[in-house]
Amino acid sequence: MHPRHATRVLAAGLLAGTAALAAPAIAQTATPGASSPGAVPSAAPASAAARTADTILTNGKIVTVDDRFTIVPALAIAGERIVAAGSAADIEALKTPQTRVIDLGGKTVIPGLIDNHAHYMRAAEYWDREVRLDGITSRKEALAMIAAKAKASKPGELVLSLGGWSEEQFTDQPGGFTKAELDEAAPNNPVVLQVIYFRIYANSAALKALGITGDTPDPRNGKIEKDASGQPTGVLNGGGAVAWTLGRLGEVSKERSVENARALMRDLNRMGITAYQEMGGRAFNAGHLEAFRTVWERKQMTVRAFYNIWQEPTSAEGVDKALAVIAGLKPFQGDDWLDHTGYGETVYFPLHDNLLARGASPTPENMAQWRRIAQAVADKGMHLNVHAQLRGTIEAFLTEIEAINAVKPVKGLRWTMSHGDQLEPQDIARMKRLGMHVQLHSRPTVQGALMLKVHGDRTYAMPPLRLVQDSGIPWGLGSDATAVTPTSPFTTLHWAVTGEMVGGRKILKETITREEALIAHTRSNAAFLFQDGNLGSLAPGKYADLVVLDRDYLTVPAAEIKDLKPVMTMVGGKVVHEAK
């Protein structure tokens, strides 16, 4: 809950050239010591008067994911925080006549899952129009879902799927969708299906709504595919075509954006997600953050959101504007529901490498612009998240960070490399000397087959989960949802343990154990949010963010991890999802 005397502060420049909102200035009563990036928030201890429980969970298997991976049968909660975890008798002693007792019936409880890298604020804008095909392995089922969404919509309303799936995931009939298929599924509604960032499938109604005819010129960096008669087929290829299409979806009102943000959070709770780090992304604007801020102001948050700020400069002039924004940033002015944590993931957009490219060769000119921004972030004493996937960018960025560190040490700021798909031992050694962290993501769950075509057998170690796990470098597991990967953390956990992409194809050999994966998706991820003392494990003093599962994560067959479902999710001791 928010401090009573919270004040709101407006700061210029969330995005270059845009007046936007910075984090509200709020007393850090819940997280003492968290006023700077180098500080580790301390957990608020339960007072003597609070040694009774408002809620008790008992008769279960509570996987605390503490430093010893302790498993206990019962847990006590007072207010928003955990009072104790231990034996049934110990927890029973904290009960009063007013205590709510939840009999788990033997079910397993895990900490709330934390996604260390996602783009949910942007995704929320059109959430009410989306059909998420995440994890759907039947083409027939996907088309039925599209048809059902169209049937439930008014004629003319958009039916969207803005990523998180690939043509390769359908085991009954791999491949994209034809205009005829989509016309049959939704004859009266425009259908726009986005594949990663490189392709759009559209039906006839969508082509009409977008104004696409046989005479429409190709968008910049994109292509409108046409048949032998010169008519559009419904396939638009290339990143430029995707951006061009999304730019024509129409504006969403503020209130609808707010309701969509709430709906997205409810869906995240249903998946077991209780906190995440927001990474902005392409086309991110002040309105996306404002929708979440409005939910926060109304005290309706059910997922804790910690966001980084970044721009997309493509020139020296753009860098000048970005530097002006950085100069005005002041992280850690929020609370434990919504807060600004740092800068990144993209630093200089021409160096934003592509997982499906064969390689990257950063030029000295581009690296000089990258250095200007990264140096400014260091000078400001802020956390930086760096998008780096391929050998060329990984090596070039580390060289620059080493040079920055010689001028302005970055240890303690938790500078982080995102993705790290082609990390090698020498890179990790350099990063450890710099005090850096690593975020690894489950994009191969839908991109693995495409990666194989580009990278060959190297794909089987992209990203190198086992190497990173064994190295001892601080790291965490996340999704990079929603455009380039499925959202469900159980899809991510399944992939980390089995190495399988959606549909069952083995795509990763550097797998880890299910215990290691769970730690990486909970306790380890709290560090990226600067919430070590508050989140990530079910330990006394930490927030009661937890998930009750329909089956035991630790003992179900590995193939079933992806199918696990939360029957209840709590955030701050409050039930935010309960299966019916």
Image (cartoon, rainbow, N blue to C red):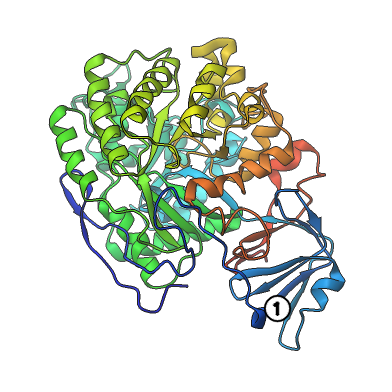
* 373 w.r.t. 273: above or below: above
Instruction: Name the spot of residue 39 as percent of width and height, x first.
Output: 46, 52
Badge 1 marks a residue whose secondary structure is loop
Q: Which residue is mark 1?
A: 53
Residue at figure coordinates x 70%, y 45% from the top left:
563
Q: Quadrant of residue 362?
A: top left
In front of the other: 36 or 336: 36
Instruction: Name the spot of residue 77 as percent of width and height, x first.
Output: 67, 72
In front of the other: 273 or 417: 417
* 257 w.r.t. 318: above or below: below
| Picture quarter with the C terminus | bottom right
Label 1 Cα crowd, 10 Å radius (few <14 / some 14-19 / many 20+): many
In the rendered structure, the answer to whether residue 100 lies left or right of residue 266 reads right
* 23 w.r.t. 355: above or below: below
Instruction: Name the spot of residue 69 as percent of width and height, x first.
Output: 75, 49
In the rendered structure, the answer to whether residue 40 lies left or right of residue 325 reads right
Q: Amino acid at mark 1?
A: Ala
In front of the other: 540 or 504: 540
Residue at figure coordinates x 35%, y 73% from the top left:
6
Res 189 visible: no
Res 205 visible: yes
Residue at figure coordinates x 59%, y 26% from the top left:
173
Q: Residue furthest left?
A: 317
